[in-house]
Image (spheres, rainbow, N blue to C red):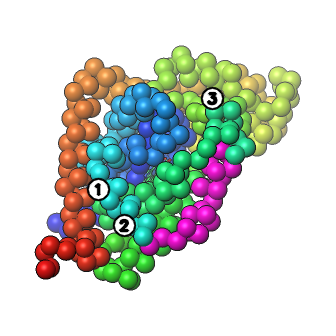
Amino acid sequence: MTERKRILTGIRPTGSLHLGHYAGALENWVRLQRDYECSFLIADYQVSDYADDIARVRAAVWEVALDWLAVGLDPEGSSFVIESLVPEHTELTTLLSWFLPLGMLERNPTLKAEMADIETGDEKKKGRSVPIAFYTYPVMQVANILMPRAHLVPVGEDQLPHIELTRETARRFNREFKPIFPEPEALVGRVPRLVGTDGTAKMSKSRGNTIDLKDSADAVAKKIRGMYAGPPRGLDEPGKTAENPIFLYLEAFDPEQDEARNMAEQYERTGVPNKVLKDRLTTVLNTMLEPFRERRAYYEANMPLVREALADGTARYRAKAQETMALVRDALDLNYLEKH
Ligand code: TRP
């Protein structure tokens, strides 16, 4: 059998995962896990913004693992990895930072946006001093992706600048030292940016506009009842689907796309009451989420299995990481004692 190509991707452990994560990335992970050798990273070195709340990070490590199992990631075929339990990541970060010019980080649009957030953003972040780790986290993300010598990185759209940085780093390293790293491709999910239930641009925990993968059927129904559905309209007035995020969700998740399109047409022509739309969306999402809830409940009742998934995946991955580090040290000629 020829060797499978490799995927490395990850998520920061800051809470449970939502529909935006699913449509933007997770769905791809589930689809690709059979064809690729996958490493899924719980990126707990990337939580400097929660350094004063490690209890939350600790809880989120388990939440994320449960969400991954719930959506159907297979912890035996793939590796679930806790980043900080593979300290090789820090070593590779240090070595790579020798070669990456600071300007490359200063131009990184995701980093710039996050920086601006700290300077002018919401209450929690505003006025905080910027930790050094904030400058180095993209380098560590590069190290994450290069560690298993990954070929493909399925991620949300906001991560693209980091993948580009990884490609540049791999090219440089291969050219200047030894060609050991593939130049990884990024793959963005079907819905790169899902609107929030409040109708604002992005579903995100900090905005409180999420539908979580672990939400109960009742919680989903309630969130949808309260969901923004465009500017106020009379019951039978036509509306513009573009102004009503319910249609974006139906487009993203309704398996009966023909029917969803008919409904959209009718909405624009003669109007459809919001309640009808919301009821449909509730059915669609609860049908999709139910198998996730069942798998989650199984693992919640069998937490030793979750622990085993994390422990085994991390151990398997660390062995690979050590192989890569041996190649890197050799390429950089750092084996002082071996070549005396
Ligand atoms: N930065 C990513 C996020 O905020 C998480 C992450 C860490 C990651 N390391 C990675 C994603 C490597 C892809 C590849 O969600």
Q: Is residue 283 visible?
A: yes
Identified at 23% across, 52% down, the residue is 318
Q: Position of residue 80 (x, y in %)?
A: 30, 44
The Cα atoms of the two marked residues, 3 and 2, are separated by 39 Å
Mark 1 Cα shell of 10 Å, populated few (<14), some (14-19), many (≥20): some
Identified at 24% across, 52% down, the residue is 317
Q: Position of residue 320 (x, y in %)?
A: 22, 58
Specify the quadrant of the image occupied by residue 273: top right
Sequence-wise, which precedes: disc 3 or disc 2? 2
Sequence-wise, which precedes: disc 2 or disc 1? 1
Q: Seen in the image, is 27 located left or right of residue 207?
A: left
Q: In front: mark 3 or mark 2?
A: 2
Q: Amino acid at mark 3?
A: Gly
Looking at the rendering, the stretch of residues picked out in magenta corresponds to 99-118
| Quadrant for the C terminus in the image | bottom left
Q: Amino acid at mark 1?
A: Glu
Q: Which residue is mark 1?
A: 88
Specify the quadrant of the image occupied by residue 84: top left
Q: Which residue is mark 3?
A: 208
Q: Which residue is mark 2?
A: 95
Q: Is residue 251 visible?
A: no
Residue in front for this viewpoint, 177 or 291: 177
The Cα atoms of the two marked residues, 3 and 1, are separated by 35 Å
Identified at 32% across, 59% down, the residue is 91
- Secondary structure at numbered mark 2: helix
Q: Is residue 166 above or below residue 251?
A: below
Please tell me whether the stretch drawn in magenta is mainly helix, strand or loop. Answer: helix
